[in-house]
Amino acid sequence: LFIERRLMKNIRLFSLLCIILAVFLFSCNGDSDYIPKPKGYFRIDLPKKEYRLFDSTCPYTFEYPKYARIIPDTFISAEPFWINIDYPKFKGRVHISYKFVKDNLSRYAEDAYNLVMKHISKANNIDEKRIDIPENKVYGIIYTIEGTGAASTYQFFVTDSISNFVRGALYFNVTPNNDSLAPVIDFIKTDMEYLIKSFKWKKN
């Protein structure tokens, strides 16, 4: 009788172990219930906002961040008073181009719009914001281009409506992934808005 009870106890213990093992194996193979972790990105340290005046032989002035640098545009098609605002830490660059207006303001504005529309295939949305600073005779439009693969996420143009026209466009020297670049894009957008507010034309 003792041996029989011992045997029954061992059988129950073995059955319990089999059930536990089966549950463990099925839980390991349950891929349909697996929820992947959201993709993470490296933390980006952003510098303190500080600005300085850009005042050169160009027919315009503005304030730009101290952590950026201004260099002449050396591209083969560059024209006088074209410059680049470089962000070395972020591999970003704002191209600034200048045009003298002579009865062709509408064409320059249309060209700026068409350059923005080149990104529409990669854009989820393109938002327009008017620039109107009459005390400095600065008028124009800011284009915010939303979309993960858009090569340029921020462009603008300003003019005095008489003789000067300036266009700006932000680009990064990296594969477009604006989800990971979002903090930097927003950071530089703030700088560009500050630049526009401080923008002034020089007297001819």
Image (cartoon, grey):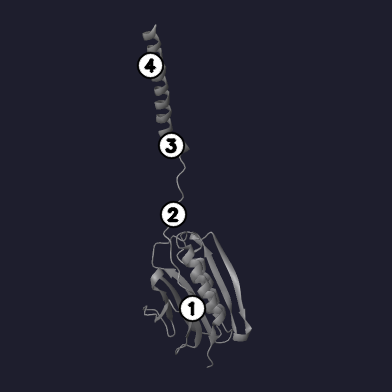
Q: Which residue is mark 3?
A: 31
Amino acid bearing label 1? Glu
Q: Which residue is mark 4?
A: 10
Q: Circle 3 — which element?
A: helix
The quarter of the picture where the N terminus appears is: top left
Q: Circle 2 — which element?
A: loop
Q: Which mark is residue 40?
A: 2
User: How far across and how far down the image is residue 23, in percent?
Assistant: 43, 28
- Give whichever of 191, 59 is nearer the camera: 191
Q: Residue furthest top?
A: 1
Q: Which mark is residue 192?
A: none
Counting residues from the start of the chain, the first of labels 3 and 1 encountered is 3
Counting residues from the start of the chain, the first of labels 2 and 3 encountered is 3
Q: Residue furthest bottom?
A: 204
Amino acid bearing label 2? Gly
Q: Which residue is mark 1?
A: 50
Answer with left or right where residue 143 lies relative to residue 22: right
Q: Circle 4 — which element?
A: helix
Counting residues from the start of the chain, the first of labels 1 and 2 encountered is 2
Amino acid bearing label 4? Asn
